[in-house]
Image (tube, grey):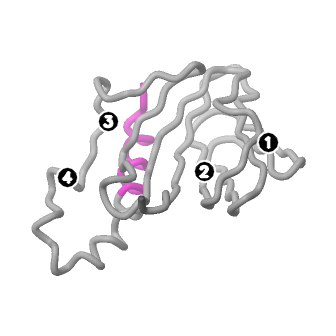
C-alpha cells in the first residue's frame, strides 16, 4: 500500500506536526509518551471513503485540534466538490496527479507538490491521473 520511503515521510510530517505541542506540554509530559506520539499505519484503522480511503495519523482530539491525515483517491475522482472551511489547510502530494482548485482557478501538481488553502476560500483536490492519488492533509480544527 505505502512504500517505506513514503512511510518515513509520513512519520517525519507527524513529528513536525506535533513538535510544537510537545514544547507547549513540558509540564504535561506524562500525557505524551512513545506509544501515543508514534502512529504507524494500521490497516485495521483505515477508513473507507466512496472514492478511496483515509487514515488519521493525528486526529483532532490528540492535541489541540491539529491533525494529520492521509487521503487516497481513485483515478479520475475527487473526495469533495468545491467547498470551503473556516480553517486553513495544507496538502502535500505523495503520489499521483492532483488538480488543485482554488477560488475558480486550477493547476496540476504531482508528487512533492504542496497546496495551501487559506480560510474561507473555495477549494478542491481531484485525482486527474490514471493511478491512485495519495496526499497528506494538515489542518487545525477549532476547539469544541
Q: Earlier in the sequence, mark 1 or mark 3?
A: 3
Q: Are marks 4 and 2 in contact (CB under 8 Å)?
A: no
Residue 93 left/right relative to 4: right
Q: Residue at x 49, y 26 (%)?
A: 53
Looking at the rendering, the stretch of residues picked out in magenta corresponds to 1-14
Q: Earlier in the sequence, mark 1 or mark 2?
A: 2
Per the rendering, the mark at residue 41 is 3
Q: Which residue is mark 2?
A: 91
Q: Residues within 10 Å of mark 4 (few under 14, many from 20)?
A: few
Residue 12 left/right relative to 132: left
Q: Is residue 2 magenta?
A: yes
Total of numbered circles in the picture? 4
Under tag 2, what secondary structure? strand
Q: Earlier in the sequence, mark 2 or mark 3?
A: 3
Q: Which residue is mark 4?
A: 36
Q: Are marks 2 and 3 in contact (CB under 8 Å)?
A: no
- Give the foreground label among 4 and 1: 4
Q: Residue at x 16, y 74 (%)?
A: 28
Image quadrant containing the C terminus: bottom left
Q: Main secondary structure of the magenta part?
A: helix
Q: Which residue is mark 1?
A: 108
Q: Mark 1 and mark 2: span between their CA atoms?
A: 13 Å
Amino acid at each position: 500500500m505505502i512504500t517505506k520511503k513514503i512511510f518515513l515521510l509520513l512519520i517525519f510530517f507527524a513529528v513536525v506536526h506535533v513538535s510544537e505541542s510537545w514544547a507547549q506540554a513540558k509540564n504535561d509530559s506524562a500525557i505524551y509518551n512513545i506509544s501515543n506520539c508514534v502512529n504507524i499505519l494500521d490497516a485495521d484503522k483505515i477508513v473507507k471513503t466512496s472514492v478511496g480511503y483515509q487514515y488519521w495519523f493525528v486526529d483532532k482530539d490528540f492535541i489541540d485540534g491539529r491533525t494529520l491525515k492521509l487521503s487516497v483517491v481513485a483515478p479520475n475522482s475527487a473526495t469533495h466538490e468545491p467547498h470551503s472551511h473556516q480553517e486553513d489547510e495544507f496538502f502535500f502530494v505523495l503520489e499521483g496527479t492532483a488538480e488543485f482548485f482554488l477560488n475558480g482557478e486550477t493547476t496540476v501538481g504531482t508528487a512533492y507538490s504542496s497546496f495551501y488553502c487559506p480560510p474561507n476560500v473555495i477549494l478542491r483536490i481531484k485525482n486527474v491521473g490514471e493511478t491512485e492519488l495519495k496526499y497528506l492533509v494538515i489542518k487545525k480544527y477549532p476547539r469544541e
